[in-house]
Image (tube, rainbow, N blue to C red):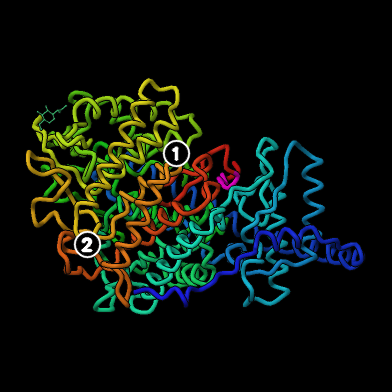
C-alpha cells in the first residue's frame, strides 16, 4: 500500500550548519562590520524613536480597556461582554510585523557581529549566559521574500529589543537565561535513535505524516479536517460551522518537530495571512476543544520557535473563550459563540452542567499563556476553578463528571477515567510538572483523587486484566473507553514525577497493567486496532459488545501510553506494540486520499468513516514518531504534553519557556 521508494528525504542540518556559521571568524571584515554596526545602531534608534511609542501606546490602551472589562465582569455574571479587541490595534503596528517575520530573514554576518558584542556585554554585565536560539534566526528558510535591507532592519530591531529588558518582547533572535541553565538547548528536532532499524520505522511514521498533510492540503486546505475518500473538507460540531483550519493548528508542531520545513512554513503562512478570528460568522464552538487544539497548538509552536505570531494568535483565541467564564461560579460553559460572546452548556449534560474533563482541562494552556503574555487574567480564571473544586465535598473522594455552573453543585454522580473525566486528572499531575514541582496544591489533589480512583474504580478481570470501571451512582459499569487508555501513560508519568509519594510504586504497576489491557483491546480485534469502548463480563474481556462501541477514529490514547511506558521503562515491548499499530493503520486506515477511521474494528473489511481527525496529526503520529526517536527529543524532563500532545515547556528548567519580562 505504501511506496517507500518515494520517501521524501528531509535535509535538516540546520543546527549544525548554524553552529558552524556562528563559529566562523569575521575578522578580515572587521572594518566593514564596525561601519555596519554604527549604521545599524542608527537604524535601531531611528526605528525605536518612530515605532516604539506607538507600539507601547496601543498596548497600554489595550491594558486599560482590559481593566475596565475585568471590572464589568465582576459587576455581574449576567453581563455578557465580549472581550476587547486587545491585539487588533497592534496588528497594524509595523513593529510587530517586523518581529513577526523574523524567521523569514537570513542570517546576516553583520548582525552576527552585533550579537557577538551584545553577548559579550550581557555576559559581562551580569550572571547571565546568552544562548543562540538554534531554530529560527533565518538559516531555516532558504529564500526570503523581504529585501536585504528589510531583513537587516528586522534583526536589528530584535537585538534592540533584547537589550531593553523592560520590553515585553523576549522572543527575538537570542534568549538570555540564568547561568544555572545548562548551555545545551533542549532537542526539538532531529533526535534520531542510534539503531538503524528504529530509524527506518521513524521514517515510515514521517512518511505517514506527509501523506496525511499533503492530502489535507490538496483537498481541504483551510477547512477543519479532511474527508479522505470523498476528498473534501469536513467540520465536526465541536468547531461549529466555522472553517478554522483545525488540521493546520493541530498539526503544525508535529510538522516542525519532524523537520518538515516546507510544510511547516505553508501552515504558518496560513495562520499569519488567512486565519482572522474577527471575520468569523456566528457559531458555537467547544471551549475545551478550541483550548486544547488551537491555544495549545499555537503555544507549543511559540515555545518551539519563538515566533511571536503564535503567541498573538493564541491570545486572540483565548480572549474569545473568556466570555464562557461569565457564570455565577466562574466555572465556564461548554460552548461559546466567537462572534457574540454568548455561552451555554450542552442540553444532554445533567441539567445544564459543565463537564469535568472540559473545564478541568484548561490549566496548562491558560497558566502558560499568562506567563508568556504577562497578563494574569488567564491564570486567574483557571486558579479560580481549581480553588472551587478543592473546596467542594467529594463523594468518597471522587470527582463526579458534571458540575452545574449556576448552582456550584455536582450533577449526576457519574465518575470516569474515560470520556467526561479523563483529562481533569491528567492536568492536575501535569500542572505540578509544568510548575517545576511548585504547584503543591495540584500534586495533593492528584494524589488524593488517584487514591480514591484506585480504591473504587480499579478492578481486575478473571483473566487478570486490570481496568478502570466507570461508576454510575455507586454502581460499577465494567466498561473502559479508548479515551481512558491514556491513564497507563499518565500513571507511569506519575510514578516518575512523584517518586516520594507512597503510591509511586503502585502507580507504575497499574500503569503497566492498564497499558497491557489496552493493547489486548487492540489485539483481540481483526484489524488490530482497538474499539471506542470495551467491556468485561463473565464471558468477554477487553472487547466491545455494542455495535455503537466498535468504531476506531484514529485515536491516540493507546499509542500515547506506549510512548510514555517506553520512555519510562525501556521495555522494547512498547515499541513492538507501536509498530503493530503502524502496520494496522497502514493496512486498514490508509487510503490514497489520506487516513480514515473505521466503523467496526472486528470486521475483515471494515466500513470507513471518511474522516481524517486533526488529532491524528497532532497526537497519534507525533507519539508514534517520538516512540521511535531518541529520548532527548522533547525530553520528559523539559516538556510536558497537553492533552492534545502539544508540548509545553517546564518552567525554570526549559529555556524555551519564554516568560514575558515584567
Ligand atoms: C470488581 O468487579 C466485580 C464484578 O465483576 C465486583 O464484584 C467487585 O466488587 C469489583 N471490585 C471493585 C474493587 O470494584
Question: In the picture shown, does residue 334 fall above or below 329?
Answer: below
Q: Where does ligand 1 appear, by image quarter? A: top left
**Number of the front mark, 2 or 1:** 1
Mark 2 neighbour density, 10 Å: few (under 14) some (14–19) many (20 or more): few
**Helix, strand or loop at mark 1:** helix
Residue that appears at 54% across and 54% down: 195
Q: Quadrant of residue 41?
A: bottom right
Q: Is residue 577 left or right of residue 652?
A: left
Mark 2 lies on residue? 237
Residue that appears at 15% across and 63% down: 603
| Cβ–Cβ under 8 Å for marks 2 and 1 | no
Q: Which part of the image, by quadrant, shows the N terminus?
A: bottom left
Residue that appears at 48% across and 64% down: 203
Question: In the picture shown, does residue 276 fall above or below 546?
Answer: below
Q: Tell which of 223 and 255 is nearer to you.
A: 255
Q: Is residue 424 left or right of residue 253?
A: left
Q: Which part of the image, by quadrant, shows the C terminus?
A: top right
- Mark 1 CB within 8 Å of ligand 1: no
Residue that appears at 72% across and 49% down: 163
Asked whether 657 falls inside the magenta stretch, the response is yes
Q: How far separated are the C-alphas under marks 2 and 1?
A: 37 Å
Query: Which numbered marker is on residue 568?
Result: 1
Q: Position of residue 514 (x, y in %)?
A: 28, 39
Does the rendering let one see residue 228?
A: yes
Q: Tell which of 391 and 572 is nearer to you.
A: 572
Amino acid at each position: 500500500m505504501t511506496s517507500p521508494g518515494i520517501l521524501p528525504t528531509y535535509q535538516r542540518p540546520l543546527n549544525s550548519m548554524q553552529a558552524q556559521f556562528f563559529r566562523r571568524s569575521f575578522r578580515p571584515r572587521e572594518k566593514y562590520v564596525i561601519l555596519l554596526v554604527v549604521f545599524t545602531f542608527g537604524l535601531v534608534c531611528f526605528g525605536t524613536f518612530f515605532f516604539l511609542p506607538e507600539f507601547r501606546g496601543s498596548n497600554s490602551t489595550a491594558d486599560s480597556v482590559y481593566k475596565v472589562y475585568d471590572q464589568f465582569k465582576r459587576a455581574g455574571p449576567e453581563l455578557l461582554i465580549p472581550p476587547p479587541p486587545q491585539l487588533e490595534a497592534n496588528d497594524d503596528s509595523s513593529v510587530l510585523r517586523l518581529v513577526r517575520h523574523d524567521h523569514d530573514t537570513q542570517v546576516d554576518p553583520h548582525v552576527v557581529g552585533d550579537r557577538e558584542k551584545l553577548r559579550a556585554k550581557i555576559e559581562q554585565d551580569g550572571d547571565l549566559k546568552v544562548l543562540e536560539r538554534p531554530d529560527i534566526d533565518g538559516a531555516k528558510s532558504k529564500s526570503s521574500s523581504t529585501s536585504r535591507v528589510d531583513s537587516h532592519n528586522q534583526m536589528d530591531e530584535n537585538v534592540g529589543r533584547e537589550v531593553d529588558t523592560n520590553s515585553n518582547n523576549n522572543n527575538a533572535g537570542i534568549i538570555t537565561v540564568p547561568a544555572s541553565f545548562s548551555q545545551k538547548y533542549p532537542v526539538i528536532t532531529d533526535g534520531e535513535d542510534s539503531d538503524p532499524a528504529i530509524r527506518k520505522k521513524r521514517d515510515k511514521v514521517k512518511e505517514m505524516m506527509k501523506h496525511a498533510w499533503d492530502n489535507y492540503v490538496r483537498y481541504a486546505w483551510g477547512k477543519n479536517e479532511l474527508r479522505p475518500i470523498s476528498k473534501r473538507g469536513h467540520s465536526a460540531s465541536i468547531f461549529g460551522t466555522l472553517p478554522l483550519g483545525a488540521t493546520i493548528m493541530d498539526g503544525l508542531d508535529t510538522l516542525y518537530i519532524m523537520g518538515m520545513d516546507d510544510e511547516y512554513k505553508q501552515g504558518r503562512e496560513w495562520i499569519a495571512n488567512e486565519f482572522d478570528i474577527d471575520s468569523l460568522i456566528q457559531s458555537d464552538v467547544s471551549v475545551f476543544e478550541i483550548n486544547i487544539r488551537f491555544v495549545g497548538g499555537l503555544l507549543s509552536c511559540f515555545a518551539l520557535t519563538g515566533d511571536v505570531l503564535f503567541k498573538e494568535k493564541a491570545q486572540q483565541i483565548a480572549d474569545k473563550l473568556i466570555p464562557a467564564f461569565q457564570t455565577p461560579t466562574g466555572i465556564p460553559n461548554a460552548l461559546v459563540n466567537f462572534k457574540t460572546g454568548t455561552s451555554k452548556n450542552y442540553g444532554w449534560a445533567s441539567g445544564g452542567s459543565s463537564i469535568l474533563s472540559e473545564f478541568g482541562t484548561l490549566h496548562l494552556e491558560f497558566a502558560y499563556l499568562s506567563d508568556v503574555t504577562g497578563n494574569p487574567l488567564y491564570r486567574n480564571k483557571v486558579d479560580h476553578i481549581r480553588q472551587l473544586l478543592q473546596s467542594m465535598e467529594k463523594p468518597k473522594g471522587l470527582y463526579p463528571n458534571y458540575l452545574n455552573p449556576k448552582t456550584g453543585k455536582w450533577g449526576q454522580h457519574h465518575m470516569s477515567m474515560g470520556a467526561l473525566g479523563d483529562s481533569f486528572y491528567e492536568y492536575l499531575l501535569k500542572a505540578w510538572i509544568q510548575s517545576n514541582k511548585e504547584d503543591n496544591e495540584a500534586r495533593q489533589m492528584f494524589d488524593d483523587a488517584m487514591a480514591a480512583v484506585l480504591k473504587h474504580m480499579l478492578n481486575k478481570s478473571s483473566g487478570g486484566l486490570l481496568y478502570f470501571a466507570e461508576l454510575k451512582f455507586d454502581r460499577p459499569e465494567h466498561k473502559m473507553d479508548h479515551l481512558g487508555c491514556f491513564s497507563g501513560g499518565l500513571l507511569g508519568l506519575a510514578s516518575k514525577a512523584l517518586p516520594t509519594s507512597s503510591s509511586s510504586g503502585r502507580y507504575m504497576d497499574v500503569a503497566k497493567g492498564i497499558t497491557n489491557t489496552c493493547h489486548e483491546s487492540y489485539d483481540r480485534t481483526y484489524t488490530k486496532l482497538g474499539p471506542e469502548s470495551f467491556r468485561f463480563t463473565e464471558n468477554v474481556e477487553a472487547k466491545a459488545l455494542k455495535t455503537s462501541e466498535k468504531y476506531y477514529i484514529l485515536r491516540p490514547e493507546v499509542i500515547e501510553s506506549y510512548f510514555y511506558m517506553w520512555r519510562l521503562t525501556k521495555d522494547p515491548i512498547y515499541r513492538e506494540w507501536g509498530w503493530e499499530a503502524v502496520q494496522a493503520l497502514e493496512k486498514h486506515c490508509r487510503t490514497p486520499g489520506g487516513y480514515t477511521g473505521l466503523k467496526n474494528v472486528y470486521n475483515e473489511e471494515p466500513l470507513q468513516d471518511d474522516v481524517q481527525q486533526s488529532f491524528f496529526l497532532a497526537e497519534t503520529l507525533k507519539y508514534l514518531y517520538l516512540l521511535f526517536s531518541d529520548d532527548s527529543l522533547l525530553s520528559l524532563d523539559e516538556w510536558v504534553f497537553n492533552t492534545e500532545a502539544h508540548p509545553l515547556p517546564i518552567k525554570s528548567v526549559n529555556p524555551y519557556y519564554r516568560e514575558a519580562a515584567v
